[in-house]
Image (tube, rainbow, N blue to C red):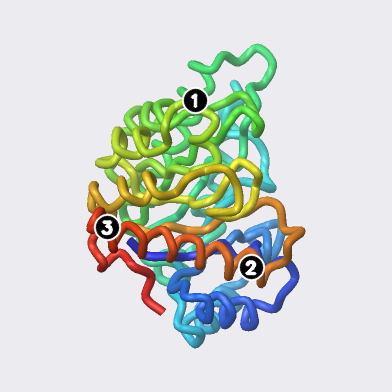
Amino acid sequence: MKFAICNETFQDWPFERAFGFARECGYTGIEIAPFTMALDAQEISAARRREVCDQADAAGLEVIGLHWLLAKTQVITSRVPTPRFANARRTMFASWPGCAAIWVDGLWSSVLRLQRNLLPGVSHDQAMQFAAEVFQAAMPVFEDLDVTLAVEPLGPVDGNFLLTAAAGRQLCEMVGSPHCRLHLDVKAMSSEGRPVADIVRENAELMVHFHANDPNKLGPGMGDVDFRPIFETLGQIDYQGWVSVEVFDYTPGPEYLARESMNNMQRVLEELAEKKVVSSRYSVSQ
């Protein structure tokens, strides 16, 4: 279990400052939303990508993945194939030549940030099929680059498509590639009316990425969600991936959000380790 934070948390901070502060707080990974650099991914040059990677490396951070890849683009669940495939290719791989080498080693995270509302006349089952077709078309490229596409379900406040972990799992199974796996998010899972820990346990073998946050849109430990059973379960399933902090309410400020999120997670892990519920090796390394 490794700890990262999403770069948009730092709003308008220069990347060098944001990366340095994230490492100071104890994070060892940074997750990049491309729209923090340009609304059109094709506008981000290879030189700029390399510069950002070098800045992260200098701060002692690993660039762990890209997320919100389709946040500023068009739909992938349309009945019409051309815009679905064109938009996906444009953002997911055609616009990122050499992405695996220049950006990340193994993970493109949270690609399904885009389309959360069904289009008129399109059923949920049809939308699932359309999305699966887009991702199936992308899989040869992902497989060749040894990159994983992580499907992230979100809750009903974010739309009416792909609202549960079960739906995300189904979509991954429809795509049918080991390079398409499940990304779970605490805020989203909290809307299912079931213990988050149970959902994590049920999807342990397919889960590749994990977002720590709260339904109040702040960081872990800043709301009503009890992270003790969640982290206990992550320890029990021997989760070795990243736990990445993602917030949506930035009003407390980057310093507070980044520092308190880490402190809260560290506190939970130390408590669980003290009770021998999880191994001390899960403690956050400063």
Kindly report which numbered mark, 3 or 2, lies closer to the viewer in this rendering. 3
Spatial CA distance of label 3 from label 1 is 28 Å
Which numbered disc, 3 or 1, marks the residue that appears first in the sequence?
1
Q: Which residue is mark 1?
A: 193
Residue visible at 44% across and 38% down in the picture? 135
User: In the figure, 137 relative to 48: above or below?
Assistant: above
Q: Which residue is mark 3?
A: 275
User: In the figure, 212 relative to 194: above or below?
Assistant: below
User: In the figure, 27 relative to 111: above or below?
Assistant: below
Residue visible at 44% across and 27% down in the picture? 194
Q: Quadrant of the C terminus?
A: bottom left
Q: Quadrant of residue 266?
A: bottom left
Q: Judge whether residue 74 can be spotted in this image.
A: yes
Q: Judge whether residue 47 can be spotted in this image.
A: no
Q: Are marks 3 and 1 in contact (CB under 8 Å)?
A: no
What kind of element bears circle 1? Answer: loop
Kindly report which numbered mark, 3 or 1, lies closer to the viewer in this rendering. 3
Q: Position of residue 280 (x, y in %)?
A: 26, 67
Tell me the number on the disc at residue 114. none
Spatial CA distance of label 3 from label 2 is 48 Å
Q: Which residue is mark 2?
A: 44
What kind of element bears circle 3? Answer: loop
What kind of element bears circle 2? Answer: loop
Q: Quadrant of the N terminus?
A: bottom left
Which numbered disc, 3 or 2, marks the residue that appears first in the sequence?
2
Q: Quadrant of residue 17?
A: bottom right
Q: Amino acid at mark 3?
A: Lys
Q: Position of residue 279 (x, y in %)?
A: 23, 62
Q: Amino acid at mark 2?
A: Ile
Which residue occupies the foreground of this view, 187 or 76? 187
